[in-house]
Amino acid sequence: MKTIINIGELTGIVPEGILRKEGAAMSDTGTLKGAWLRIADDGTIADFGLMSDQNPACRLWPLRTGGAQDSGQTETDASPLPDGEQIDAGGGLVMPAFCDSHTHIVYAGSREGEFIDKINGLSYEQIAARGGGILNSADLLHRTAEDELYGQALERVQEMMSKGTAAIEIKSGYGLNPEDELKMLRVIRRIKENVPATIRSTFLGAHATGRGYTHEGYVQEVIDMMPRAAALADFVDVFCDEGFFTPDDTARILEAGARSGLRPKIHANELAVSGGVQVGVKYGALSVDHLERTTDAEIDALKGSGTMPTMLPGSSFFLGIPFARAKEFIAASLGIALASDYNPGSSPMGDMRFVMALACIKMKLTPVQALNATTLNSAYAMGISKQTGSITKGKRADLILTYPGWTLNRIPYTYQTPFIKSVFINGETAA
């Protein structure tokens, strides 16, 4: 048992049973000023409340001897602290750790040469058309030993955890043949077994057409891979977009995934209005991701569904493409999630604080909306919002403790100033 005391502001409080925020609820989050939070031995949130609470079971002090509180209580009023470790927040903010529901962090090496191509004016589509992009990553991954691939990916996961992320979805998709796709999924499983963060695995065999295949031949290869991939993955994904996979291709792959017990998560509408949102909703996708190019038809298709629209502002920033219409989705009573899209070609970063800042600066979300989108809703987009993503009794104590004096508004405002004092993952200090 451990207790964090003297919390300046405890934010991201969500009542039990709420698994996502939509519409007007995106602008709301529970907050306590002058708070404490208790972590159970199993790493979950046991309880929380106000430091000034008169309930003897809750009355906590910064030290076991000395120091009256601002409430006017005296030392002699104080009840004994509960057994266990006591962590003095010193007035810092405590919030839920970030959840990142869309990453491609199992990759080999770098595509920094393409960075120069982008500077010189080549588009994402032009780089892909001349054999670059995803196919370059697939070639390099094929030449990289599995242990080396694991080591590179683990460094990225550790970087993300140090920046406050406690739950990560990781996709395959740089293999593009059975042997290498399964190699990627084994690496993701190994990461899952060796880090405290919650890891979810997605089979993205349909990321591009693999070298040496016809398009139709590769669609069939992905379908044939499905039972073996399903033994290692939680979800199936398809890049349903212009120049990649059509809605018909996507439907066939999702049907094969369903036969193997995999729920969809779809790439859609990054490059064009592709029909990916509609096919995702039809097949019960947990999320449809990217959405830089959408119309009112996509918003209408998502209404009343269980599918979470997930937006990736890091990709818009890096590629210079439109930012998704976040405010219009919220105005239509939908929720949104935000994720990093950490990958070597279109969003080479996994800093969810920067994602939050981009959402505020470029998409005009409020800090509260951005918080909900990077925590509870992103957890929902991984199917884990019962376990993490908010300050809720019984959920994992996945928390960020800031330095003293920080507020939620300041986090995306001064978006490069160090703010994290400690990261807790399942109740244990991770950074």
Image (cartoon, helix red, strand yellow):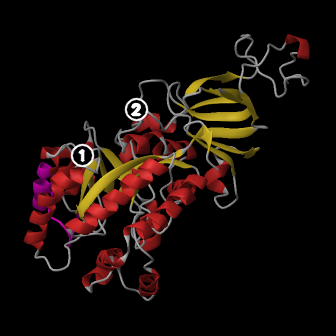
x and y percent of residue 211 in the render?
20, 79
User: Vertical placement of 2 versus 329: above or below?
Assistant: above
Q: Given the image, on which type of amino acid does mark 2 rest? A: Leu
State how far apart marks 1 and 2 are (Cα).
Answer: 16 Å
Mark 1 Cα-neighbour bin, 10 Å: few <14, some 14–19, many ≥20: many
Q: Left or right of 255: which side holds 190?
A: right
- Kindly identify which numbered label has been placed on residue 285: 1
User: Is 402 left or right of 132, judged from the image as shown?
Assistant: right
358 vs 323, left or right, is right
Percent from the top left, x then y, of residue 311? 39, 55
Q: Is residue 377 visible?
A: yes
Q: Which mark is residue 100?
A: none
The residue where tag 2 is placed is 19
- Give SS at disc 1: loop
Q: Name the quadrant of the N terminus.
A: top right
**Which of the two discs, 1 and 2, labels the residue nearer the N terminus?**
2
Q: Give percent across and percent down for residue 106.
A: 40, 64
